[in-house]
């Protein structure tokens, strides 16, 4: 089925990261082959060495990294040993690279068209004039609308999905034989993710290019790859076809990855139902804890300014979870910020515990902060790096003057225990903690003032799947124990299913569908909800038949 | 296409609003500088009559003093004089010097060309030298050389201008007889003062640009360029430099103030005629109208240059226009 000579051959590659104190062995003897035209997925969590491996392939390792052993041979050239100039002749032309986060990988002060054309100019595949024409063509191929207009625009004028398409256009403009795609869609909305991945698939098939797809999502890998390598702590722990990996995983790590992937299992109930089993279900109180009526928000002064939020009404019962799902720009975060009273709505009211809080000002608004707290998406940016974990957790108590010094310390210790962090974490700084641990700190901080409602804005999007499932389980458990209500914001329906009583689907600022979690998942009414559901990777029970057919 | 046309129209519109906002700010700054300097200078303790007559006022009769007071308008209240002088300033009349009785504008206009020459030359030297050091420091393959180059700017900032001027005179005039030590004669007399004036500025530019370049070269978009097969030079000049130039450009606007104040010391050291000398003499003679005129001139220059910098920004960074109003909103809220 495959040709005898591999296009890319990776042999026993070892890469170390040196810091002043320690040396981290990030990649410990990784080896694999890619044959022309095939798609190989490398799956693993952050820290598994998958991105470091990808960076080594295009010689973009950070300065702190050193390759201590091994070889990477592409079509006869050893990328690690060859002179820089000869590797440069391959990069962009024979090896295309699609990076992880489209928002930062485009030069902000250069026009889109020039950035695409550059790769052709560098490799003398076109002169200045024809390069721009070819660039517009490449943009059109990558699925950019109005490519001739976009070519004259700058990155900040494009959405995340469009930027990723530009990066795809750059990677494919010179018709490479191998495309290295390092988590090409993790920073994008689910529906966009699917389109982009489909597009990469179609384009590379047309070119006959091989693809190395780096991903943390086993579901994505299973859907799209011919072969999967599972990477853990810098080593390949398992490799095989998607059916082999998902149907009959050999390594315990692979099994734990499959178990944690929210898209791949629903058997045995959700985190929510499991957490509530142990607690006697208290009767729902008849009045909702929070009720928002007809919220609208426009940014900008003109009358035709787009409405970020357009007539959204919702209610949350005490001790229950309402999830808002939608892609970026759907208005879910703005809705959350209105409810948090961080932005004022253009119209509409927010009623909390029977009181209209839309107009609250000054001290009374401050006191409301005690009852409504928030956990943000990015646990790396939302914790003050100079404070200790104990101080971070106790900060709401201090700023709202709810407890004295000793009391605060006791409460911080209690909360650290509640979110299942070791007591030793109290004295540490955020940078000494992992992403999941940091998010636990952020949750503990939100809970410190015993709020009645916690707004969780994409609380697990920045985390690995296994950590994601731990955090979701923790959130469900805390709710059952403390009776706190959640407003859960997410773009990921698979995650939402795990923790929600009710789900609202936002699309272009409007609530297009809402109802119980089961109703949304079993009988979706709106076209957009169905598209969101379709974007969830299929998983092991329904093997990717279409792709198998193409290869037989 | 209609979509694109509308986008272009709004972009022209927002550029217009951006420019109007910056111009209004500039006018306000000049007005504030005029008001503050006028009120402070004229209410400072000191015998204004003695300054006007250029000596001791004790041998003047009361009638003579009264006449001088009336002649210079000193018998009117400060606030009346302020509005009066503000009105004159609008017509370009900044009064007359106490010591020479010549119009302040004429004095400044005479002194200006000489200072403009060394300031322009000094600024060009600063940009060229600063950028060269920054680019070499980030390009240097050996860590040792890079650190050496990066050590230059802090050193240059720390050197006092008068000492540097004297050192340059000692080496290039007295030892090698390359350039004249003093005076305003010929282009050669510009070289040493321009370098003296430019070195602190070049150090600031070098430091900021080196930092900016190092940061830009670490940015993901530089990796994208490398992944296209771009050479290190291409990454540096086509991608990093333009991004790194933005903070350096901001400072270039601010250093105009440094150049003007630097000219005071430089022109004294090199015995040159110019705005710096005029300032030094006016201050020591407490020649208030001249001091006032120089302050306003400096404010106008400063404001105009920074206005130009603000207008160049959008050409370097297409994001500025959309970002600027938001930033102002944030400041208001804080």
Image (cartoon, coloured by chain):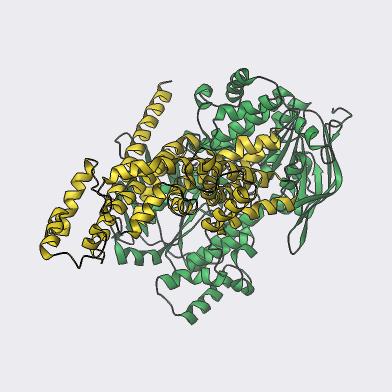
Chain colours: A green, B yellow
- Residue situated in front as seen by the camera: A438 or A529: A438
Residue A225 location (% of width, % of height): 73, 36
Residue A102 pos. (x, y %): 59, 39
Dividing the image into 4 quarters, which one contains the N terminus of chain B?
A: top left
Q: Residue at x 18, y 45 (%)?
A: B87
| Residue under the image location 32 percent in, 40 percent down | B23
Question: In this orientation, which residue lies closer to the viewer: A199 or A61?
Answer: A61
Q: Residue B332: in sight, yes or no? A: yes
Along the line of sight, which residue is nearer the eye, B40 or B70? B70
Residue A283 as seen in the image, left or right of residue B134: left
Identify whether A335 is placed above or below A178.
below
- Choose top left, top right, bottom left or bottom right for residue B48: bottom left
Outermost residue to the bottom: A406
| Residue B68 percent coordinates (x, y) | 15, 57
Q: Residue furthest left?
A: B63
Residue A392, above or below A164: below
Quadrant (top left, top right, bottom left, bottom right) of the C terminus of chain B: bottom left
**Identity of the residue drawn at 59% across and 35% down:** A164
Q: Is residue A511 above or below residue A118?
A: below
């Amino acid at each position: 089925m495959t040709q005898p000579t591999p296009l890319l051959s990776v042999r026993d590659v070892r890469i170390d990261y040196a810091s002043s104190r320690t040396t981290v062995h990030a990649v410990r003897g990784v080896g694999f082959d890619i044959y022309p035209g095939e798609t190989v997925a490398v799956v693993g969590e952050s820290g598994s060495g998958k991105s470091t491996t990808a960076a080594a392939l295009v010689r973009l390792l950070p300065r702190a990294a050193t390759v201590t052993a091994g070889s990477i041979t592409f079509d006869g050239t050893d990328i690690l040993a060859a002179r820089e100039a000869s590797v440069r002749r391959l990069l962009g032309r024979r090896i295309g690279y699609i990076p992880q986060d489209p928002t930062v990988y485009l030069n902000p002060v250069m026009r889109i068209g020039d950035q695409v054309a550059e790769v052709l100019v560098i490799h003398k595949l076109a002169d200045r004039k024809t390069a721009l024409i070819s660039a517009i063509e490449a943009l059109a191929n990558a699925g950019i609308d109005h490519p001739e207009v976009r070519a004259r625009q700058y990155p900040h004028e494009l959405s995340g999905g469009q930027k990723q398409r530009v990066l795809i256009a750059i990677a494919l403009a010179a018709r490479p034989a191998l495309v290295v795609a390092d988590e090409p869609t993790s920073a994008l909305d689910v529906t966009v993710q699917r389109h982009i991945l489909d597009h990469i698939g179609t384009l590379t098939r047309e070119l006959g290019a091989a693809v190395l797809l780096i991903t943390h999502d086993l579901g994505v890998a299973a859907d799209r790859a011919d072969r999967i390598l599972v990477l853990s702590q810098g080593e390949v722990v398992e490799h095989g076809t998607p059916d082999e990996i998902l149907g009959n995983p050999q390594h315990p790590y692979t099994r734990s990855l499959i178990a944690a992937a929210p898209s791949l299992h629903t058997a045995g109930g959700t985190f929510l139902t499991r957490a509530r089993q142990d607690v006697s279900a208290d009767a729902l109180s008849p009045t909702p804890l929070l009720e928002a009526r007809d919220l609208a928000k426009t940014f900008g002064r003109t009358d035709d300014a787009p409405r970020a939020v357009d007539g959204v009404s919702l209610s949350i019962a005490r001790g229950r979870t309402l999830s808002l799902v939608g892609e970026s720009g759907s208005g879910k975060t703005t809705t959350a910020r209105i409810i948090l009273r961080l932005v004022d709505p253009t119209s509409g009211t927010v009623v909390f515990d029977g009181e209209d809080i839309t107009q609250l000002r000054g001290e009374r608004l401050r006191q409301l902060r005690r009852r409504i707290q928030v956990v943000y998406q990015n646990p790396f940016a939302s914790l003050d790096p100079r404070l200790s974990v104990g101080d971070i957790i106790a900060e709401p108590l201090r700023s709202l003057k709810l407890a004295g010094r000793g009391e605060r310390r006791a409460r911080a210790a209690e909360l650290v225990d509640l979110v299942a962090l070791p007591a030793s974490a109290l004295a540490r700084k955020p940078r000494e903690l992992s992403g999941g641990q940091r998010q636990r700190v952020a949750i503990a901080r939100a809970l410190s003032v015993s709020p009645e409602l916690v707004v969780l804005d994409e609380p697990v999007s920045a985390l690995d799947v296994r950590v994601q499932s731990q955090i979701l389980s923790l959130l469900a458990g805390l709710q059952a124990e403390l009776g706190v209500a959640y407003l859960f914001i997410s773009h990921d329906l698979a995650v939402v299913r795990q923790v929600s009583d009710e789900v609202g689907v936002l699309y272009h600022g409007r609530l297009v569908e809402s109802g119980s979690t089961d109703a949304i998942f079993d009988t979706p009414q709106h076209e957009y909800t169905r598209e969101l559901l379709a974007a969830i990777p299929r998983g092991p029970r329904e093997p990717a038949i279409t792709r198998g057919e193409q290869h037989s | 296409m209609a979509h694109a046309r509308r986008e272009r129209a709004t972009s022209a519109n927002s550029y217009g609003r951006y420019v109007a906002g910056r111009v209004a700010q500039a006018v306000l700054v000049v007005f504030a500088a005029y008001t503050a300097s006028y009120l402070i200078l004229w209410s400072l303790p000191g015998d204004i009559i003695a300054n006007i007559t250029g000596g001791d006022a004790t041998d003047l009769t009361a009638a003579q003093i009264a006449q001088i007071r009336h002649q210079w308008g000193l018998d009117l209240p400060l606030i009346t004089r302020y509005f009066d002088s503000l009105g004159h300033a609008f017509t370009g009349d900044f009064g007359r010097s106490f010591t020479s009785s010549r119009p302040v504008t004429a004095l400044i206009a005479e002194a200006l060309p000489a200072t403009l020459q060394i300031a322009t030359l000094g600024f060009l030297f600063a940009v060229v030298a600063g950028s060269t050091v920054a680019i070499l420091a980030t390009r240097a393959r050996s860590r040792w050389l890079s650190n050496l180059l990066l050590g230059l700017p802090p050193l240059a900032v720390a050197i006092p201008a008068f000492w540097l001027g004297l050192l340059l005179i000692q080496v290039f005039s007295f030892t090698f007889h390359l350039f004249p030590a003093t005076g305003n004669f010929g282009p050669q007399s510009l070289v040493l003062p321009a370098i003296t004036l430019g070195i602190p500025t070049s150090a600031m530019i070098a430091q900021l640009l080196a930092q900016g370049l190092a940061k830009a070269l670490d940015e993901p978009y530089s990796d994208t360029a490398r992944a296209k097969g771009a050479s290190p030079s291409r990454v540096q000049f086509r991608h990093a430099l333009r991004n790194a130039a933005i903070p350096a450009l901001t400072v270039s606007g601010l250093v105009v103030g440094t150049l003007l104040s630097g000219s005071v010391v430089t022109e004294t050291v090199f015995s040159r005629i110019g705005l710096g000398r005029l300032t030094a003499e006016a201050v020591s003679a407490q020649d208030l109208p001249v001091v006032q005129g120089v302050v306003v001139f400096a404010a106008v220059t400063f404001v105009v240059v920074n206005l130009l910098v603000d207008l160049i920004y959008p050409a370097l960074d297409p994001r500025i226009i959309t970002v600027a109003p938001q930033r102002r909103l944030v400041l208001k809220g804080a």
